[in-house]
Image: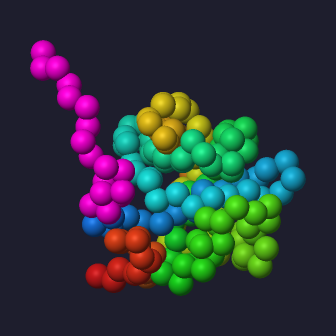
Amino acid sequence: MRQQQPSSVVPQEFRRVLGHLPTGVTAVTAHGPEGPIGMVVNSVTSVSLDPPLLLICPAKSSSTWPALRAVGEFCVNVMAGHHEQLCRAFARPGPDRFAGVAWHERAAGPGIEEAVAWIGCRVRQEHDAGDHTIVVAEVTDLEAASDVAPLVFFRGAYGTFTA
């Protein structure tokens, strides 16, 4: 077996290069004991079709993830192209990220109005991964809107995608 060499990859360069990979933008929400809670997450991907699983990767420094974890279930809101300001507000620390945000009741967490899709999830497993946690969640409910352009993050900026 080859001996592993220490990585010479500088974190800032890693972030810059991987910023060339377009990602979707989501708001992960839950019904907290004091009201709705949520945060922006762009590390979301499907894991399995049978059973239906997805993963999210919250930063270990997140003050919101422990509250979401405590609830045990959450809604992944796939954000639409016009949700940039909402995402910026959800990315900032603060007690009431939902002030002025239109949302509707969903079983796993608040569904943000005019999102591209809503995916209800139940936390299944967590794995340590450097400065993030890999959260594997079972999909319990899902719905997609039609003809809504998604919000995309690319090279440090928000944009949209249309077919």
Range shown magenta: 1-17
Q: Which of 23 and 91 is in front in this view?
A: 91
Q: Residue furthest right?
A: 34
Q: Is residue 3 left or right of residue 85?
A: left
Q: Can you give x and y, in whole percent of width and height, for residue 84 in the image?
A: 54, 79
Q: Can residue 106 be seen in this view?
A: no
Q: Which residue is depicted at the point 85% across and 48% down?
A: 33
Q: Is residue 162 left or right of residue 30?
A: left
Q: Can residue 131 be seen in this view?
A: yes
Q: Nearer the viewer, residue 3 or 33?
A: 3
Q: Can you give x and y, in whole percent of width and height, for residue 55 in the image?
A: 46, 44
Quadrant into which the N terminus falls? top left
27 above or below 49? below
49 above or below 95? above
Q: Which residue is depicted at the point 62% across and 48% down?
A: 62
Q: Which residue is depicted at the point 66% across and 72% down?
A: 89
